Image (tube, grey):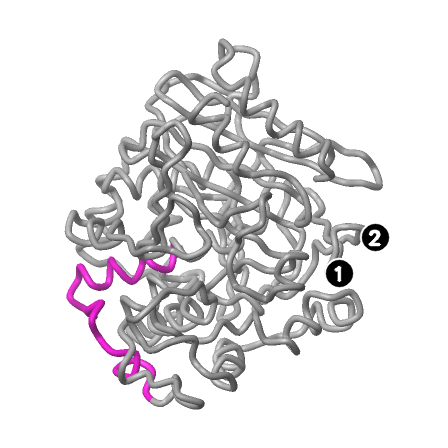
Amino acid sequence: MDVNLPDRLSRATGKRAETHSTGVLRLNLGDTRRVCPPDPARRRDDERNDNGEMDMIVRTTLMAATAVALTAALAGPAIAAAPTASGGRHDATREAIEAAVKDGVPGVTATAEDGRGVWSATAGVGDLGTEKPRSPYDRYRVGSITKTFVATVLLQLEAQGRLSLDDKVDKWLPGLVHGNGHDGGRITVRQLLNHTSGIFNYTDDETFVRTYFLKDGFFKHRYDHRTPRDLVAIAMSHKPDFAPGTSWNYSNTNYALAALVIEKVTGRPYGAEVRDRITAPLKLNATSVPGTRPTLPQPSSRAYGKLAETTTGPTYDVTELNPSLAYGSGDMISNSTDLNRFYTALLRGDLLPARQLKAMKTTVRAEGFPNAGYGLGLIDRKLSCGVHVWGHGGGIHGSSSEAVTTATGRHALAFNFNGDWAGDSDAVIEGEFCGK
């Protein structure tokens, strides 16, 4: 979910076109065996989702095979908190994150991994009141990075023969996508995942913007519970952006629906499927689907926003909110180490069979994303030096994140700004992969 940015408030586009966050995630993981201090975030943090289904485990052939395939990946190291040992490989990345702080971002945490080791760096502060620095182990709201997790689960379900990407939405959610020209009988699951459905983006609704993204509305409604069907109903009150399959537009409604499809196919909360199929096998202990829990698990920093249509004016602490407003499209929490591990495993083929991974990496032209194509919850982006990176980006109140990897999984980067109005995330990615 890409929300709470001054650009969105003034333009209501549904796309991350502002300079500090492009909505593109890239990441990649190296094969190092450096011994590092224990990560305090590595303790098991099985926080329950709304339905309290932490003990429900569904074992399938695909899931079991995935767990076996990931054994080697799980032997990877914790973060090495010694950037001076990098031999200058990450100097441009460090300069870019320090520049983001000079530009107004309260604090940045970044972790990169390549074949020669793991590197992490922080800049700025995690708490404007106490001036406590950010930590390499910080957990943060990842926004639309959630979309890659949702798409991965749906593709696993397809690999098991439990659904088809060409199924119509009405097959699984009959009657839900209807009104003002929307027709779930003409839209496929694939079109949800690659944003070619034409379904209106509910976070562009003017009332929704005033209620959740501007100061007066946010502080009154930050703890509101919204069901996914509420969010879809907002979209259905508008006309479609275009006929299904005829164009492209980023829509958070697509992924609210995708998560609902997961629940209909499996009979379980989508967060339980993400946990059992991805986060538990990969031991992503800092990653969770929080349900309606408004707080961030520790360790974490505070998150800050302007809650206005401009980048000037007061800065507000927006850390606490009910993430149900971003169900399926941007509600997840993670940290940089976990995101690197996830995207590396995904691109290396550890989470999906070759056929499904190929489908995920089949892109369409994405308006508003220069030099990029959008696949199924995954973005392919060509950098200025010619390197291609794959991943996603995400923005939600007080948090702007990126996670990217090369196609082979040999070089990964994930980072977070704990402010949503400043900083150039493109420069951080270019610094890491292009050295400039």
Q: Nearer the viewer, residue 211 or 273?
A: 211
Picture residue at 80% right of the left edge, 50% below the top: 312
- 117 lies above or below 3: above
Picture residue at 64% right of the left edge, 32% below the top: 135
| Image location of residue 419, percent across then percent down | 68, 46
Q: Is residue 269 left or right of residue 361?
A: right
Compute the Cα span from label 2 to label 1: 8 Å
- 34 lies above or below 127: above
Q: Is residue 427 visible?
A: yes
Tell me where residue 207 sits by quadrant. Answer: bottom right
- Secondary structure under tag 1 reads loop
Q: Nearer the viewer, residue 250 or 169?
A: 250
Q: Is residue 158 left or right of residue 49?
A: left
| Image location of residue 249, percent across then percent down | 42, 65
- 235 lies above or below 328: below
Q: Which mark is residue 308?
A: 1
Range of residues picked out in magenta: 149-174
- 231 lies above or below 323: below
Badge 1 crowding class, 10 Å Cα cut-off, few under 14, some 14 to 19, many 20 or more, is: many
Q: Amino acid at mark 1?
A: Ala
Q: Amino acid at mark 2?
A: Gly
Q: Is residue 42 visible?
A: no
Badge 2 crowding class, 10 Å Cα cut-off, few under 14, some 14 to 19, many 20 or more, is: few
| Image location of residue 278, percent across then percent down | 35, 50
- Secondary structure under tag 2 reads loop
Q: Are the two marked residues, 2 and 1, in contact with CB atoms closer than 8 angstroms?
A: yes
Q: Nearer the viewer, residue 348 or 4?
A: 4
Q: Which residue lies under the disc numbered 2?
A: 313
Lower position in the chain sequence, tag 2 or tag 1 = 1
Picture residue at 37% right of the left edge, 33% below the top: 28
